[in-house]
Amino acid sequence: MATTSTIKGVSAPSVPKPAAPPLQTPPERDCAFCPRLADFREANRAREPLWFNAPVDSFGDPNGRLLIVGLAPGMQGANRTGRPFTGDYAGVLLYATLIEYGFARGVYQARPDDGMTLVDCRISNAVRCVPPQNKPLPAEIANCRQFLRATFETMPRLRAIVALGRIAHETTVKALGLRAAAVPFAHGAVHEAGRLRLYDSYHCSRYNTNTGVLTPEMFRSVFAKVRANLV
């Protein structure tokens, strides 16, 4: 029932506020927010029509307490398979580490039907479409932040976020409304953000692991902290 309000002594029915639109966590399959990425996606569809070639949705439990934020789908990975960190080298270390610390079950076989399940955990990306040369532009990162923010807001039990790499860290900080200077990126850093903790890690890319920027021990140490805090 509508309430009434009084303006200069005249009683008039107030206008009910419209319902808030539902939060959209995955972009539409033909999302056109980023023209460069849309053109790249169409070219990939023409070249590899059997690949996924669409914005990649989050994978895992929406009621999980842990969210992992990567950079973007890899060309041979999630862009091909449709599941984050599946089909390229980065997923090998990530899923092995998640299994070790009880955030995943199964055997990772680099394909979306391998039966892997996440436990109290979800994986997403800062940018949902594969970018040329794996390098999204600042405007593309900003365009996709709405979907990252919606992912946070639709995880009611979210307590921990692991940002893989500086770009994932920076867009997560903006999506959370934090002051960047107060939460600088550093591998192994832990930042308090209200009810959340933000954990930083170098990205588990082949380049980082091959060059020694990130070792498996360094990567595991981040998830050891998360596991210790999610008791």
Image (cartoon, rainbow, N blue to C red):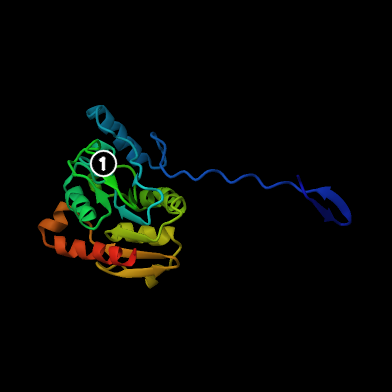
Q: In this view, does 106 lie to the left or right of 194?
A: left
Q: In which quarter of the image is the N terminus?
A: top right
* Vertical position of residue 199 compared to residue 118: above or below: below
Residue 89: % across, % down: 16, 47
Residue farthest to the front?
Answer: 231
Instruction: Tell me if mark 1 has few (under 14), some (14-19) or many (20+) residues whose alpha carbon lies within 10 angstroms of its own.
Output: many
Q: Tell me the SS state at disc 1.
A: helix
Quickly name the residue at label 1.
78
Q: Nearer the viewer, residue 156 or 174?
A: 156
Q: Which of 227 and 95 is in front in this view?
A: 227
Q: Residue at x 22, y 45 (%)?
A: 106
Q: How many marks?
A: 1
Q: Residue at x 43, y 57 (%)?
A: 175
Q: What residue type is labelled 1?
A: Ala
Q: In the rendered image, which quarter is residue 114 located in?
A: top left
* Vertical position of residue 213 compared to residue 52: above or below: below
Residue 2: % across, % down: 76, 46
